Image: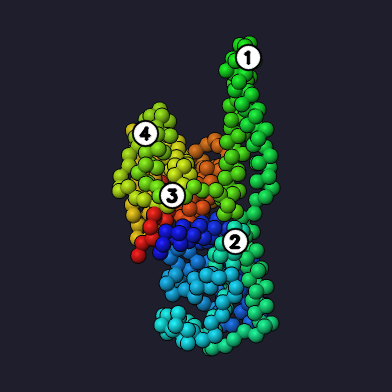
């Protein structure tokens, strides 16, 4: 795959992950659509299929006992190459699919019709499709029905990414807060004369609190843009060793005061990404790890070139994360018991930034031995 095409594919997968729909449990709002499509179009199978980097994953699956298949056998991967409905009257007569194992074996696909679904950014991320074991063609009314049902599925995919009120509020608050914060810093600096001790203490508190509010509005903007799939990124070739080094520098003093050692291992894996944003991701994970670590323990960052995606593991020796929190850990405003303070946005933003790169972040608890966060990112060049 050429570099430009690879960048475009990363952008598309980032938009998919930005919806927050991929790898979520079944939901009636999607199942209702596939049941309706199956009934109205007299098809034995109807799917809401989302096309990831190397697989197609079924958000809703009516009539087929599966959750995902390799992208290499996906009809939907072809359907998202153009915005119009794609119809395959007889797969055995189509050179793209005649030798497809899904055609020659179960579920014995002969007919396929898929209506592409777009993210809020306009990227095509999957389809609402119907499948039959017999050759056939949709008539004009059936095509209109599938397009209408597809528009419904598309709205449901985009629903989780909407945050206009938060975005507007954050944007409108950020400018005056930044101005107030700057003015208070000038007062604190003594450029306009020294302040009485009591007034100086009050200004110091105000500077600290406005700084926190400015960071909170920035975080809310990042979260909103990442969920929309419109987080601005300066994409280039990035070495993960340099990202690790910069993130270590950001938390070095905090780690030193906590008596925690920082270590890294693995090759300098190259990825396509925004260097500053990836440093932000690793810094967030390391800062959380330092908070839960006890003196004389080690936080380790391990880099590896996976079979499809590059991986970075952040491992600590803290108390671990309770099982009831593991399922909610990346949701906004969820605070971990082990890491008091903050607004509970750090991990949600971390996930959003990684998703904007077309990657993913997961957590595994190995308590009492600690916690491992794993970040997966697209490599600088496609593999395989």
Residue 28 in view of the camera: no
Tell me: residue 90, above or below residue 2: below
Location of residue 107 in the rendering, given as x and y in whole percent from the top left corner? 47, 82
The tag earlier along the polypeptide, 4 or 2, is: 2
| Labels 3, 4: front one | 3
The tag earlier along the polypeptide, 1 or 2, is: 2
The tag earlier along the polypeptide, 3 or 4, is: 3
Please tell me in which quadrant of the rendered image residue 6 appears. Answer: bottom left
| Labels 4, 2: front one | 2
The tag earlier along the polypeptide, 3 or 2, is: 2
Which mark identifies residue 122? 2
The tag earlier along the polypeptide, 1 or 4, is: 1
Location of residue 221 in the rendering, given as x and y in whole percent from the top left corner? 60, 44
Tell me: residue 309, above or below residue 214: below
Label 1 close to label 3 by CB (< 8 Å): no
What residue did someone put label 3 on?
236
Residue sitting at x 45%, y 38%: 287
Classify mark 3: residues with Cα within 10 Å, few (<14), some (14-19) or many (20+): some
Label 1 close to label 2 by CB (< 8 Å): no
What residue did someone put label 4 on?
260
**Residue 149 vs residue 45, the one in the foreground:** 149
């Amino acid at each position: 795959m050429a570099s430009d095409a690879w960048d475009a594919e990363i952008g598309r997968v980032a938009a998919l992950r930005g919806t927050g729909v991929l790898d979520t449990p079944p939901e009636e709002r999607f199942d209702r659509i596939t049941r309706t499509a199956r009934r109205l179009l007299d098809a034995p199978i109807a799917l809401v299929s989302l096309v990831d980097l190397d697989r197609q994953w079924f958000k809703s699956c009516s009539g087929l006992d599966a959750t995902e298949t390799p992208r290499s056998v996906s009809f939907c991967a072809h359907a998202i190459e153009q915005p119009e409905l794609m119809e395959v009257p007889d797969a055995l007569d189509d050179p793209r699919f005649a030798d497809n194992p899904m055609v020659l074996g179960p579920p014995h696909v002969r007919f396929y019709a898929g209506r592409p679904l777009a993210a809020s950014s306009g990227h095509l991320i999957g389809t609402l499709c119907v499948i039959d074991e017999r050759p056939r063609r949709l008539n004009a009314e059936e095509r209109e029905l599938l397009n209408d049902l597809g528009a419904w599925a598309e709205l449901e995919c985009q629903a989780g990414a909407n945050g206009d009120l938060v975005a507007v509020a954050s944007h409108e608050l950020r400018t005056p807060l930044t101005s107030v914060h700057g003015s208070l810093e000038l007062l604190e600096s003594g450029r306009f004369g020294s302040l009485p001790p009591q007034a100086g203490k009050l200004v110091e508190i105000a500077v600290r609190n406005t700084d926190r509010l400015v960071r909170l509005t920035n975080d809310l903007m990042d979260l909103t843009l990442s969920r929309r799939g419109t987080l601005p990124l300066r994409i280039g070739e990035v070495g993960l060793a340099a990202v690790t080094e910069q993130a270590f520098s950001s938390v070095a003093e905090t780690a030193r005061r906590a008596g925690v050692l920082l270590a890294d291992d693995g090759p300098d894996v190259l990825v396509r990404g925004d260097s500053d944003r990836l440093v932000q991701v690793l810094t967030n994970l390391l800062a959380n790890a330092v908070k839960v670590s006890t003196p004389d323990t080690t936080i380790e960052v391990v880099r590896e070139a996976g079979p499809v995606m590059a991986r970075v593991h952040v491992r600590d020796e803290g108390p671990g994360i309770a099982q009831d929190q593991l399922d909610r850990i990346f949701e906004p405003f969820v605070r971990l018991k082990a890491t008091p303070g903050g607004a509970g946005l750090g991990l949600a933003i971390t996930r959003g930034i990684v998703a904007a790169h077309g990657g993913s972040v997961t957590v595994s608890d190995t308590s009492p031995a600690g916690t491992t966060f794993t970040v997966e990112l697209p490599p600088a060049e496609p593999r395989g």
